[in-house]
Image (spheres, rainbow, N blue to C red):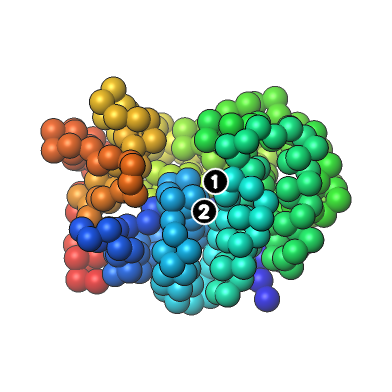
Amino acid sequence: MTLIDPKTPLGGVIPPIITPLTPAGDIDTRSLTRLVNFEVGAGVSAIFVHGTGGEGPYLSDAEQHTVLATVTEAVAGRVPVLAGVSDIGTNKVLKNVGIAEQYPVDALVTTSAFYGSVGPVEIAHHYRTIAARSDLPLYAYDIPVFAGTKLPAELIVELAHEGVIRGVKDTSGEEDGFRYMIENTRDLPGFSVITGSDITGDAAILQGAHGLIVGVANIDPHGFVKVFEAASRGDWAAARIEQERLHKLRLIAKIAAKRISGFSATIGAFKAAMVLRGIIDHDLLQAPLQQINEQEKEQVAAVLASQGLGRIPELSRV
């Protein structure tokens, strides 16, 4: 049983939540529960676990179980839970699907298979095979910078009309394809086109996108809910003002990017910001990803302060 209505596109703000760790490297279930309640309390429309920001492909089977058990218990049916199942091959994805299906999740999300090169034929086979093996709605995730392959917009539309996928999260930055998918799936009542861009959410909604799956919503979900609500009622000036503020916040991802990888710099800055706000307790990352250093954390703190984002007192009691 899924909370996602097959005739209504999934939309709104959907944070791809990070996976907090303890100093020993275990899943920090206390922080994870606090994070979920913070996000749901901010008015988000769903929770996405095991995505890129959640370091999903790094998680062991046991860690996947812990995250899914913790998140679904904390959500308690208040909003849909989307489970990322991405992996390097179809059979490994199906194994992750089997883990996710043991919990009350509402949909699956996956990239194409990665590491080995794939093209449209392999991508289509990948999604059709997964859809045939699960009754849960399946969402495609287009993030070529990590998956190594761009999902062709024409193929996404084809799979949508076949009923193989229920929507797409587009983090490709390829505007022609994004608009093509919006224009060519409008006749599908339950199909969602969702942007993965933290900085163009207002523009995406103006084009006809249904929602935002954005990493910075881990830090400031209230801001993105404001963007979505303003855009949904056609108040584009309010949406733009809030989106520009969030763009300034997104710049924390660049603070450590000259010292460590862009991925480490981004997730490291997000986790550091969340510690500073009291949302999670520790900012460790899955190896081989690296934390940002103390000097860089001071710069993150300065950006938070400039945006009026301090420690959240009520979270410290949770």
Quadrant of the image for the N terminus? bottom right
Q: Quadrant of residue 305?
A: top left
309 vs 166, nearest the viewer: 166
Residue 82 appears anywhere in the view: no
Taking the image as shown, residue 174 lies to the left or right of residue 33, namely right
- What residue is shown at x 19% (from left), y 54% (from top)? 311
The crowd level at tag 1 (other Cα within 10 Å; few <14, some 14-19, many 20+) is many
23 vs 4, nearest the viewer: 23
Above or below: residue 183 compared with residue 140? above
Q: Amino acid at mark 1?
A: Leu
Q: Which dot marks residue 168?
A: none
Q: Position of residue 238 (x, y in %)?
A: 46, 38
SS for tag 2? Answer: loop
The crowd level at tag 2 (other Cα within 10 Å; few <14, some 14-19, many 20+) is many
Taking the image as shown, residue 162 lies to the left or right of residue 88, namely right
- What residue is shown at x 58% (from left), y 56% (from top)? 85
- What residue is shown at x 78% (from left), y 46% (from top)? 125
Q: Position of residue 22 (x, y in %)?
A: 24, 61
Q: Position of residue 286 (x, y in %)?
A: 34, 49
SS for tag 1? Answer: strand
Quadrant of the image for the C terminus? bottom left
Residue 296 appears anywhere in the view: yes
Taking the image as shown, residue 155 lies to the left or right of residue 31, namely right
- What residue is shown at x 39% (from left), y 53% (from top)? 18
Q: Which dot marks residue 14?
A: 2
Residue underneath mark 1:
212
1 and 2 marks in contact (CB < 8 Å): yes
Going from N to C along the chain, the mark reached first, 1 or 2, is 2
